[in-house]
Amino acid sequence: MDKRQEIEDLLKEYNQEHIIKYFDKLNKNQEEELFKQIQKIDLHQITELYNNTKRPIEFKESKIEALKYLDKAKLTKEQKTKFDDLGKQVIKNGQYAVVTMAGGQGTRLGHNGPKGTFKLDVYGKGKYLFEILVDNLKEANKEYGVIINWYIMTSKENNQETIEFLEKNNYFGYDKNFVKIFMQSELPIVDANGRLMMGKNYKIKEASDGNGGTYSSLRRSGCLTDMKEKGIKWVFIGPVDNALLKMADVTLLGMAISENVQIASKSVVKANPHEKVGVFCKMNGHPKVIEYSELPEEMAEEVDNDGELKFGESHIMCNLYTIDAIEKISKEILMYHSAFKKNSYIDENGKEIVPQQPNSYKFESFIFDAFEFFDDIAILRGKREDDFAPVKNAEGVDSPKTAKELYEKYWNKRKN
Ligand code: UTP
């Protein structure tokens, strides 16, 4: 059977035969590229993921309990010194690495380019988000007398632009030999009827598969092996878009070692019981981040003996893992979530359609869905004003304006 026939049969089997109509528009090269791409797509998986969007969400009978945490501000002097010393030693021994997740699309911010290339208007001159992260790493390097290995995850969409930007800016003075850039994988997006969509250059439209893809991408890219060869024991995975992110928090690291856990996470307390954030809990005996929409109202308001919210620790994407934990998760299959979003496409006449309303499903896995593979994780409560200045929305909450204010306030306090 010739290749074209083979591909056509495959598409028909999964109700994707509309794609065949594009074939006659393609030159030899485009045809070859498209056929190669289609063969790599798991059409069975995509059909399943689409069908799942039509199934009502089942809230299974679950036992939800509070997850204990330590408040950094309330540690005794002895506890703090013990944790910090343990953490410092690991970093000084060169056993610590940082991963930055920079593969997101940043749709809410609407910046033209990878999010790390967004310039936050701080102190007049401004700083790029990547530059802020480098500053933070350099500060740690100076303090602990090492150069921390830094792994940056990009997406297919923004990889080239990210590399060019970092090269052009000379990695903001970071030693390039200690930086590795790797790409996360992608999944096709589908329209409201579950049909694949054609993108520019006549390739099936795909998008990055969510920050939960970090684990398997670390393994597939060879970065995990690289870490092991370098003797790295602990890996911090953080976002690109938190202007107050601490890339090397020795207290968090020391706490993880002291508590003998494989994963530790930094939290900040919810701004109010109904803030729309995911919070830590234990579900059916395993650590989990529960979405605000799944947390019963009375639980969201419940307080403990100290008057603190029982489910008040928000997940802020500051997660620390042993290398073994990353390896284990990288071989597991995480669940996928779907989001209905706006995506342009090429119609059967070759015309680009730019939708005004959401028109397609994107499938993503989330970094925190891996926690439930473990019996326990340790949580360290930080402080919003020290740890959390997210750049998510173009305006309003968690916007460049709020992040600038938080960043400048923090650094003014540090300078005084
Ligand atoms: P968000 O989930 O907030 O997504 O990412 P985003 O792309 O920044 O913004 P929106 O939702 O499109 O507006 C949190 C962190 O996870 C990374 C982001 O780059 C950010 O650091 N991320 C997200 C990835 O690395 N890959 C993804 O597929 C998704």
Image: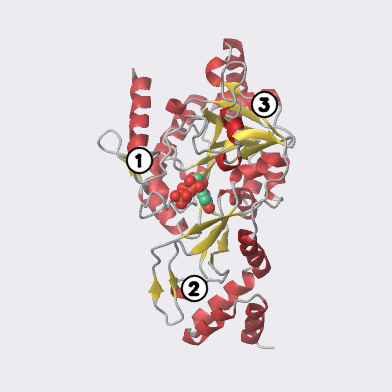
Whether the residues at callouts 1 and 3 have beta carbons within 8 Å, the answer is: no
Please identify the residue farthest to the left as the structure is shown: 124
Residue in the foreground of this view, choosing between 67 and 371: 67
Relative to residue 24, is residue 144 depicted above or below? above
Rendering quarter of residue 344: bottom left
Residue 204 image point, x, y percent: 52, 71
Sequence order check, earlier mark of 1 and 3: 3
The CA distance from mark 2 to mark 1 is 34 Å
Q: Secondary structure at mark 2?
A: loop
* Residue 326 coordinates in the image, percent (x, y): 67, 43
Q: Residue furthest top?
A: 77
Residue tagged by mark 1?
396
The residue drawn where x is 39% and y is 68% is 354
Q: Residue furthest front?
A: 298
Q: Amino acid at mark 2?
A: Met
Seen from the viewer's position, the closer of residues 2 and 350 is: 350
Residue under the point 50% across and 56% down? 155
Could you tell me which secondary element the residue under label 3 belongs to?
A: helix
State which quadrant residue 161 falls in: bottom left
Q: Inspect the image, locate mark 1, and give the three-letter code of the amino acid beneath it.
A: Gly
Residue 291, image x, y percentages: 58, 41
Circle number at residue 257:
3
C-alpha gap between disc 2 and disc 3? 49 Å
Q: Of marks 2 and 3, which one's residue comes earlier in the chain?
A: 2
Measure the C-alpha gap from mark 1 to mark 3.
38 Å
Q: Is residue 320 above or below residue 53?
A: above
The response on whether ligand 1 sits within 8 Å of label 3 is: no
